[in-house]
Image: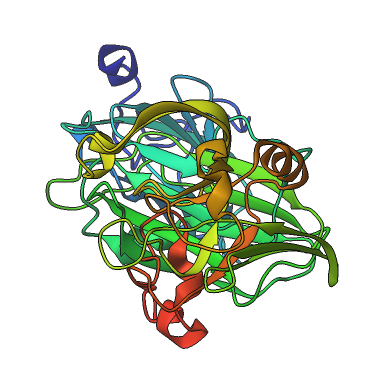
Amino acid sequence: MASAMAALLAPLAACSSSASPGASSSAPDTKVTPGADDRPVTVTVTPTGERVPAGESVKVTAAGGRLTSVTVIDAEGDRLVGKVAADGRSWVSDRKAVPGAAYAVTAATRTEGGTAKSTKAAFTTAPADKVNKVDWRPGAGTTGDTTVGIAQPISLVFDHPVRNRAEVEKQLRITTSNDTEGSWGWIRDWSGRDRVDWRPRTYFKPGTKVTLNAELNGTDSGADGGWFVRDYTTTFTVGAQQIVKVDLDRHQLTLVRDGETVRRIPVSGGTPGGDKRSWRGTAVLMAKEGTINMNSETVGLGDAYDKMVDSSMRLTWSGMYAHAAPWNARYFGNTNHSSGCIGMSDANAAWFYGQVRPGDPFEITGKDTKGVVAPGNGFGAWNLSWTEWQRKSALR
């Protein structure tokens, strides 16, 4: 790729000998004696050369005339968009040059005397020595037809550390159909990795359309993080105003939709007094996982259980679910006697599973719990005040 572009490299002070905007030459026009009003335009392009560092905008300047247009195209045919300044003296790309790419630059100019000319240049960028990838939710392939609950955040978890958090955050753009107020916040994911979430100030309004454009390609994560070499995008629509209220002291779950109680379900939460207690605060339904194997050893509870569980709805990364628990039938509605999950009958769990969607908030109260769900344990950002959450932005 670099060798193909090297042939395009030419002295940047050159102009073509033709008046055609499409023509170019690497030598000054020797057929016309420049006058005071028609001297050649000197064009400078940066960066220049081979294997130059990525992550910088492309800049083109003109002396002795004006830029009329600039085109910067990589070897894949993708274009770096920019705009010529009002005085015609400069052009800067909106996006940065990405790692491991070859760029061809064409600058069309006009002299003070009106002669149109063209200058071509090329450069290549060094490949990334380390690539940082992103796991984002709602995830890849999500379309505008995807409907989520009113508490669904946008969450990006990074493979490697992100030290240049402000630079990365600047590349993350959220648009909503009703100008929803929200903020990014940097947190530690349950996995131990760096993570940034965007949540609204309050729950989304039903019907809101949300789009993330993470224009990260060509952005440096900083020390130990590597480069981002692609962009990420996701779009979704917010569904009905649906809130699940779980009262562990009363052993009851209530589904509230658009302010009206749909059903109350007797449940049993985590056993008081130890590691089997449930979390409290606001958890967000992360995923509906159906019938899954639950093994207590995976959540640090020894060999207490190992069984297939129906209607499983994940609430935290640490293993708290709402699910069917027929073995606990005698405790529903009167005693908390689970290993931390919110259990209910098969019939109630099947009905409830069909009603909720990822993004629905579970507002959990109770005196004897393990504490409040942490921001990185699932989608626990709602347990921080708006002011506390805003402070986690790298741009505040």
Outermost residue on the bottom side: it is 387
User: Within the image, what quadrant is residue 112 found in?
Assistant: bottom right
Classify 349 as above or below 57.
Answer: above
Task: Determine if residue 281 is in view.
Answer: yes
Q: Quadrant of the N terminus?
A: top left
Relative side of 35 to 26, left or right: right
x, y (%) of residue 188?
28, 59
Q: Is residue 293 left or right of residue 177?
A: left
Task: Depth check: give the residue in front, 364 or 105.
Answer: 364
Residue 123 drawn at (x, y percent): 30, 31
Q: Residue at x 22, y 28 (%)?
A: 127
Q: Where residue 122 appears, x then y in whole percent? A: 35, 30
Up the image or down, 301 lies above or below 392; here it is above
| Residue positioned 33% across, 36% down in the render | 133
Query: In terms of depth relative to the viewer, which is nearer, 346 or 258?
Result: 346
The location of residue 236, given as percent across then percent down, is 70, 46
Above or below — where is 75 with respect to 370?
above
Q: How is the image coloured?
A: rainbow
Q: Residue at x 67, y 41 (%)?
A: 349
Q: Is residue 82 visible?
A: no
Q: Quick one: 189 or 119, which is closer to the camera?
A: 189
In the image, residue 265 sits, relative to residue 368, either above or below, namely: above
Number of marks present in the image shown: 0
Q: Image point 29% across, 52% down: which residue?
A: 190
Farthest front residue in view: 330
Quadrant that contains the C terminus: bottom left
Q: Answer with the quarter of the image where residue 113 lies.
A: bottom right
| Observer-nearest of 342 and 345 | 345
Q: Is residue 13 left or right of residue 150?
A: left
